[in-house]
Image (cartoon, rainbow, N blue to C red):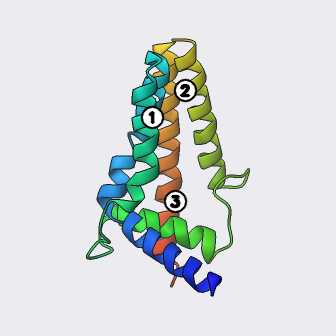
Amino acid sequence: MVTGISERFEDWFWARHSNPLSGWTRVPSGAAIVYAVYRRDPRLLGAALAWTALNPFLFAPPDTEDAWMTRAVLAERWWIGEEGNRTVGLDYPNACNAAGALGFVYALYAAWRRSPTGATLGVAASVGLKLWWLRVLVDRYDHRAD
């Protein structure tokens, strides 16, 4: 019984999160979190964290899978679920996502130290590497039947 509820919730969650508006509006979330740390603004930090957590629930499922970001979210689910992979690791492409996570940690550290250049470079590396990882997953997802 619990498994069925869990699977239905997971399907519902991923369907809504695969709306391209959900994916694209989450992209700047990391920058907003880093900026809130830089400014030492707890309200902005709370709002950015709340947005990050609630975002996947706010959008209706997309009508089609044509949008790149829709396929990126579906590819991530496929990569984790059907292919049995993790999202970070030392193997390619997961090393891109792992390095992006380290870039985000560096961005937080730089923001805390009030280094705008370091914070900006960390966020740029984080976002760039995450999108690179997703690009690779989308390519593999699109060619999975071949």
Query: Dot 1: within a 10 Å radius of its alpha carbon, few (fewer than 14), some, or many (20 or more) residues?
Result: few
Q: Amino acid at mark 3?
A: Val
> Is 116 displayed left or right of 95 in the figure?
left
| On screen, residue 130 above or below 17 | above
* Residue situated in front as seen by the camera: 126 or 39: 39
> Is 26 displayed left or right of 119 in the figure?
left
Given this view, does label 2 or label 1 mark the residue nearer the observer? 1
Q: Earlier in the sequence, mark 3 or mark 1?
A: 1
Q: Amino acid at mark 1?
A: Gly
Helix, strand, or loop for circle 2?
A: helix
At 45% from the left edge and 34% from the top edge, which residue is drawn?
A: 46
3D distance between C-alphas at marks 3 and 1: 32 Å
| On screen, residue 98 above or below 115 | below
Q: Are marks 3 and 2 in contact (CB under 8 Å)?
A: no
At 29% from the left edge and 57% from the top edge, which residue is drawn?
A: 21
**Residue 97: image x %, image y %?**
60, 48
Given this view, does label 3 or label 1 mark the residue nearer the observer? 1
The quarter of the picture where residue 41 lies is top left
Q: Which residue is mark 3?
A: 136
Q: Which residue is mark 2?
A: 107
User: What numbered label is drawn on residue 46?
Assistant: 1
Q: Are marks 2 and 1 in contact (CB under 8 Å)?
A: no
Helix, strand, or loop for circle 1?
A: helix
